[in-house]
Amino acid sequence: MLDLNLLFQGFATVLSGPNLLAIVLGTIGGIIVGALPGLTATMAIALLIPFTFSMGPTTGICMLLAVYTAGIYGGGIASILIRTPGTPAAVVTVLDGYPMAQKGLAGQALGLATVGSGLGGLFSAICLALFAPILAAFALRFSAPEYCALAILGLAVTVTMTGRSPLKGAVSATAGLLIAMVGLDPIGGFPRFTFGSTELVGGISFVPMLIGLFSLSEAFRQVEIIEKAEQVTAKIGRVVPRLAEIVVHKWVVLRACLIGITVGVMPSMGPETAAFMSYSETKRTAENPEDFGKGEPAGVVAAQTAENASTGGDVLPMITLGVPGDAATAVLMGALTIHSLEPGPLLFRDHPDVVHQIFAGMIVANLSFLFIGLLGARYFAKVLNVDRRLLVPAIFLFSLIGAYALNNNPSDVWVCLIFGFIGYLMQRYDFPVSPMVLAQILGAMAESNFRRSLAMSQGDLMIFITRPIAACILILAVLAAVSAIRRSLALSRQIAAAEAAAK
């Protein structure tokens, strides 16, 4: 159960000078990165991790949480003003946000988007604080077979939720599994796939790899399409909405919060799916569905609220089970590990003070972007006028500095460069990057716990069937795999039918 005394102590710690400053700076940085098309919260977190290494754990994690929540919200700014989503999750906001701006209601759209995101984020943060201790207490019953089954389920869901091509998701996940095998054997301790290199004995450096995949790869991609940024022409009027403008959408907000937190808990779905489902359901139940797509304020509220409501759900499995919900929480998981905090149920048992500081930090981070967003929306809009020819070199430089600064090791720079190029090629040929990162984490988790399970059962695989929790989790994994195969076959039939019709 949630310990209110520890939570209040967590608020006292988070609201102290250095931690509050870190949240404010993280909020401003997150909104700016989220607002710039092509840049994502995941990229910002990966880039910032090395610079938080010298901070205390609470300060560093608070800053990263602020970047995460504010970055998800910031994507809506570009969607509303220039019809270009700042983040993938903000695609749905374009549908009604940009038409509102064309009608001269850009300020109202930004205000509703900010309030919706803030309320959704607060709801998800409170749910995280309420339910995470319960799930962690239940997870203390888990042993190696349950964790192995959980990792397999995570891998299965990761592949099934990777867009139109589960095959490409499977290829990306397989690459992640192979990367996870580089280094010392987790049980025997002998080197694997190191090719005689001492640099690879400890495995491929995780954070430099993340910086390469999510930050440097974006710099490479921006070089290919570089052009002067589209200018913001919409006039931004009053941003802070009246109370009546918020109250009229109360049921939209509540529905979006419930959809967002539910979708967020499911691995690999994230804010994009939450926004789409919330928008679709709001349109379906509206009295005026024909107005959606033409500047309907409820559409903006539904999308933005669900996006940020998913953040707490994404963090929930990561912090309680050690299973990241999406790429952003995989990066956050790496940040916790760097600060000697291993996500999972033992974190709640061994470091309850830090856990409650994370809860408090998540709540304060959402309040931070709510107020800063309302007060500074018109100023953040000016960021969209920045010339990309200045932005791209800065991303490239900070990526390499961050990769080197973590361990002061030149080989980490090479890791960053190599994976930056790999990430660029994956984006160019439409291979999802997230499954590679998630599979690297889940693959190591599955392998070590699979071998521990066999040691427990003296080589008997029935241990995964005779333990009820492990068996139930494996059944869910099989259902997810079957779903992916059926979806892939259905897509193949649709493509074949379309090609036949075109002839």
Image (cartoon, helix red, strand yellow):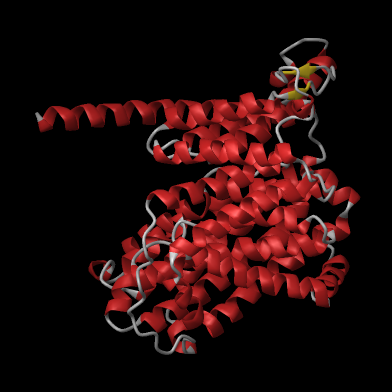
- Residue 295 is situated, as x and y percent measured from the top left of the image, at 29, 74
Is residue 393 left or right of 61 when viewed as pictured? left
Q: Quadrant of residue 388?
A: bottom left
Residue appearing at x 41%, y 83% in the figure: 107
Is residue 151 left or right of 40 when viewed as pictured? right
**From what the image shows, is residue 131 above or below residue 455?**
below
Is residue 462 left or right of 282 when viewed as pictured? right
**From what the image shows, is residue 265 above or below residue 154?**
below
10 or 145, which lies in front?
Answer: 10
Q: Quadrant of residue 389?
A: bottom left
Is residue 328 something one can see in this rendering? yes
469 or 299, which lies in front?
Answer: 299
- Residue 249 is situated, as x and y percent measured from the top left of the image, at 43, 76
Residue appearing at x 65%, y 37% in the figure: 414
- Residue 10 is situated, as x and y percent measured from the top left of the image, at 83, 68
**From what the image shows, is residue 346 above or below residue 74?**
above
Quadrant in the picture for the C terminus: top left
140 or 372, which lies in front?
Answer: 372
Residue appearing at x 72%, y 47% in the figure: 404
* Number of marks in the rendered image: 0
Residue lying farthest to the left in this orientation? 503
**From what the image shows, is residue 230 above or below residue 172?**
below
Is residue 429 left or right of 442 when viewed as pictured? left
Q: Quadrant of residue 22?
A: bottom right
Residue appearing at x 66%, y 66% in the figure: 66
Is residue 250 something one can see in this rendering? no
61 or 496, which lies in front?
Answer: 61
Quadrant in the picture for the N terminus: bottom right
Residue lying farthest to the top in this orientation? 459
- Residue 217 is situated, as x and y percent measured from the top left of the image, at 52, 45
